[in-house]
Image (tube, rainbow, N blue to C red):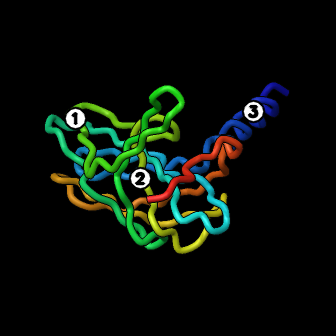
Amino acid sequence: MFLRPFTALTMAFTFSLPAHAQETKLKDLLIDNPFARATVANQRTGGAYVTIENKGKNADKLVGASSPVAKSVEIHTMSMDGNVMKMREVGQIDIPASGRVEMKPGDGFHLMLMGLQQPLKAGDSFPMTLVFEKAGKTEVKVKVQEKKDAGHGGMHHGH
């Protein structure tokens, strides 16, 4: 009798693990959970995010990115100064030795998808190539997620 509930619990836990988590290894870099936020019709920009962990003893840099879903991909940083959102292109992100950079909506780094070819729909995915100064290039599969704060404007700004 004990075995049946235990088996059911184990199966429930196994199938409840996040389906969106994807990990890519490139030399000493571990690239995890690439995702983008869904966009609306006629929205020409979008944001993509990824976590990069450097397991090595030497620093590296994310120096570029590209994707067939956008005309270009720029590396940006965003910060809030009071009630004013400040966003700027940074060109590269330092990935320190034994360090970690987590891109997430809101504050910090993100990959700005410029000139979207079509809206990004929740549940879809698309390829993105990340270019590192030392480790080279790798392609990741970016999963599109529903906007959690759709009422807060998201990434609606013009460049």
Q: Which residue lies at the image location 52% right of the left edge and 57% below the top edge?
A: 46
How far is disc 1 from disc 3 in space, using C-alphas? Answer: 40 Å
How far is disc 3 from disc 2 in space, using C-alphas? Answer: 39 Å
User: Of 33 and 155, which appears nearest the observer?
Assistant: 155
Q: Nearer the viewer, mark 1 or mark 2?
A: 2
* Image quadrant where residue 119 sits: bottom right
Which disc, if any, is residue 58? none
**What percent of the width, then of the height, locates residue 131?**
27, 58
Q: Does 101 sit above or below residue 150?
A: above
Task: Name the amino acid type tagged 2.
Answer: Leu
Crowd around label 2: few <14 · some 14–19 · many ≥20 (10 Å)? many
**What percent of the width, then of the height, locates residue 16?**
68, 41
Which residue is under mark 1?
96
Which residue is under mark 2?
111
Q: Does 57 sit above or below residue 124?
A: above
* Image quadrant where residue 122 sits: bottom right
Q: Quadrant of the C terminus?
A: bottom left
Crowd around label 3: few <14 · some 14–19 · many ≥20 (10 Å)? few
**What percent of the width, then of the height, locates residue 140?**
41, 59
Which disc, if any, is residue 9? 3
Which circle's residue, 3 or 2, is located before the other in the chain?
A: 3
User: Of 152 and 119, which appears nearest the observer?
Assistant: 152
User: Of 14 and 87, which appears nearest the observer?
Assistant: 87
Instruction: Report the side of 156 relative to 66 (left or right).
Output: right
Task: Name the amino acid type tagged 3.
Answer: Leu
Which circle's residue, 1 or 2, is located before the other in the chain?
A: 1
Q: Which residue lies at the image location 35% right of the left edge and 42% below the top edge?
A: 52
Task: Name the amino acid type tagged 1.
Answer: Pro
